[in-house]
Image (cartoon, grey):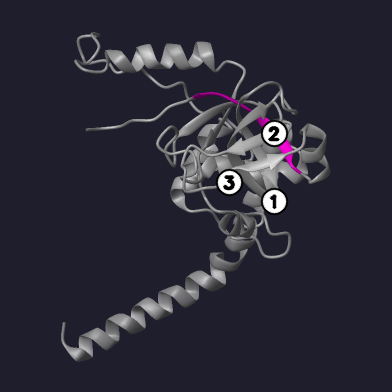
Amino acid sequence: MTPKNGERGRGIIQAANKRAGKKVGKNFQLQLNPGLRDRLFKQMDESNIQEDERLGQLCLLTGRVPQTVKRWIDQKKPGLPDLMSFAVLCVRFQTDANWLLGLTDVKYPLPAQQSHQGETGKKSAGFEWLDYITRQVAEKGAVGETFYMSGDEMEPRIKKGAPILVNTSINEIEGNGIYVLQYQERTIVRIVEDRIGEGLVLSCENKQYKDTVLKDAATATKLGLKVIGKAELWVQVTSS
């Protein structure tokens, strides 16, 4: 493209952008944002996620840091999530992207996923194990909410980004185990152990992080440590 043609091309693009901004850009931006934030809040309310739990839950779901998630739910100037996070939210709340984006007024559930089958009706070779895993997850995680590991504190046991099924009906420490906790607007995953003579020990699988020792569960509550739920199952794919 010659310089003359290049300038002409840029002029056409600028004119098109200007016309688009006047006709649809501003209105569409207003509808998309904060509309997406408000519809996301609606989905979270329907899932019984409390207002003070929204930030932590979204961090767990998408694996994004609080600073990023805060921009999506800002009350004055909300931002938009990245495409991967948006897809995760659609799957988590089982709602189609069109409604969540405000492109349609009717909210439809996501269509049921079809099994991996070829034209002959037989399952494609190598995918049978997926059905087995799906059944195991459905049976063991029936009471769970799905979250995603946002950090590396539980590696190698639970890798960063791994989905975790959490029993959110458990809102206090009920025996030793792995818990999803919220502290000062941060969502964390910790191994919780009640040690005789020491107290309540919060530890990470990754030994780069130090243990936290509390006197008891009441002390944890006073410090503002909140139990989101207890981890029941997690899924991760590893390779040699």
Looking at the image, which residue is at 66% across and 38% down? Answer: 181
Q: Which mark is residue 162?
A: none
Region rendered in magenta: 225-233
Q: Residue furthest front?
A: 197
Q: Main secondary structure of the magenta part?
A: strand
Q: Which sits earlier in the primary sequence, circle 2 or circle 1?
A: 1
User: Split into 4 quadrants, where in the image is the C terminus?
Assistant: top left
Splitting the image into 4 quarters, where does residue 27 fall?
A: bottom right
Looking at the image, which residue is at 77% across and 33% down? Answer: 216
SS under mark 2: loop
Type of amino acid at the residue the image marks with label 3: Cys
Type of amino acid at the residue the image marks with label 2: Glu
Question: Badge 1 is on which residue?
Answer: 185
Contact flag, marks 3 and 2 (Cβ < 8 Å)? no
Picture coordinates of residue 21, whole percent (x, y)? 53, 72
Q: Residues within 10 Å of mark 2 (few under 14, many from 20)?
A: few
CA gap, disc 1 to disc 3? 10 Å
Looking at the image, which residue is at 45% across and 50% down? Answer: 83
**Res. 103 visible in picture:** no
In the image, 133: left or right of 41? Answer: left
CA gap, disc 3 to disc 2? 31 Å
SS under mark 3: helix
